[in-house]
Image: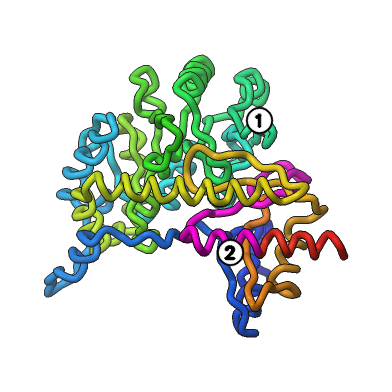
Amino acid sequence: MHISQRIEKFEASPIRRLRPYADHAIAQGRKVYHLNIGQPDIKTPPALIEAVKNIDFTVLEYGPSDGLTEYRKALPQYYARHGISLQPEDIMVTTGGSEAILFTFMTLCDPGDEIIIPEPFYTNFGGFARMAGVTLVPVTAQLEDDFQLPSIDAFARKITSRTKAVMICNPGNPTGHVYTREDMEALAALVVEHDLFFIADEVYREFVYDGLEHTSILSFPEIADRAVMVDSISKRYSACGARIGFMVSRNHEILAAALKLGQSRLCPPHIEQIAAMAAISTPQEYTDEVLAEYQKRRDTVSRALSEIPGVVFSHPHGAFYIVARLPVDSAEDFAIYLLNEFDLDGETVMFAPASGFYATRGLGLDEIRIAYVLNVEDLTRAMEILKAGLAAYTAR
């Protein structure tokens, strides 16, 4: 017997595949600073936790396949605070942003169709594309240019008869890049000209620094019929385990088609939706404090990287990730070295090799993604370990 060829073509996540090495290091008594995964240590809003504690069910029943009605009615209040006018019927609740991505791919594309996307991109986009039989066609952004949007001509040259959509993540994971309104206007014009869909993952909209502003894909009425926004509560409320996301579009034909997939999986998590609905009332002070904290963390990591010989990095203006190029041939080998062979007073560090965020083979082999999701003290220590580990590794 053999497992499917489909699953054999899947690659393990660069974010999680080194976890066995970290587990081994921990089993040996070493402390590991986890900079590999976007799991914040920020406290979840109390209202979300209290909503779970106060649930009083006699029966935990199925909910509607597109999400609890009262939750969908409440969500436009959240989006209105970000200048996005929506109606409940524009929103489908999903089991995390992950399911929203998969549903979007499966709804808009047939197997063999193509989606053009700037690389590096969130590695799980690739996994969901393979599930849907979709090919992601990369347009490479450059670290030296702070991962700015490649030229529109570069996108246009990738368009074929199988192209169905253009996709971005804004702010970007793994790059932290924030696309300007001019960038978004140019992409909107491109998809209209070539009759394509436009997909945007906007889960990090709260995390934009240095006076920049986030521009939503839903800000352009001229693409209302072709725009699909993917969203999630995971990052904004530090509630990654709740698994509540959204597929948002003013094209109700798209959502009606996606609902067929939603009905097949029955319903998104019921209890978590109740908690997420309570989180809508989270005061702005919470978001402001979290934003200020992440900016301090970003600055801590940026300063530390700038002091490490041979390291080149892109200074991010959004999300909570930094991509850095190291003076090594293989960032993955270096990551394994840190977990297997190196420690500084019994402590080591783990990051995500960046090659897994590229679709083009051979790119990113000497790059890493750092998630600055730990407090400033821990980040400072983790960067000390990274600097010492890199010096020891390159001196071998």
Q: Is residue 267 above or below residue 341?
A: above
Please tell me which of labels 1 and 2 falls first in the chain.
1
Residue at figure coordinates x 59%, y 72% from the top left: 32
Q: Position of residue 20 (x, y in %)?
A: 63, 74
Which quarter shows the C terminus? bottom right
Amino acid type, callout 1 = Asp
- Per the rendering, the mark at residue 246 is none
Residue at figure coordinates x 48%, y 60% from the top left: 374
- Residue with the mark numbered 2: 381
Residue at figure coordinates x 80%, y 53% from the top left: 328
Which quarter shows the N terminus? bottom right
Work out how far the residue at label 1 is from the one at label 2, CA to CA, in angstroms. 29 Å
Q: Is residue 146 left or right of residue 252?
A: right
Amino acid type, callout 2 = Arg
- Per the rendering, the mark at residue 145 is 1
Q: Is residue 129 above or below residue 275?
A: above
The one of 351 and 224 positioned closer to us in this rendering: 351
Q: Are marks 1 and 2 in contact (CB under 8 Å)?
A: no
Q: Is residue 38 left or right of residue 69?
A: right
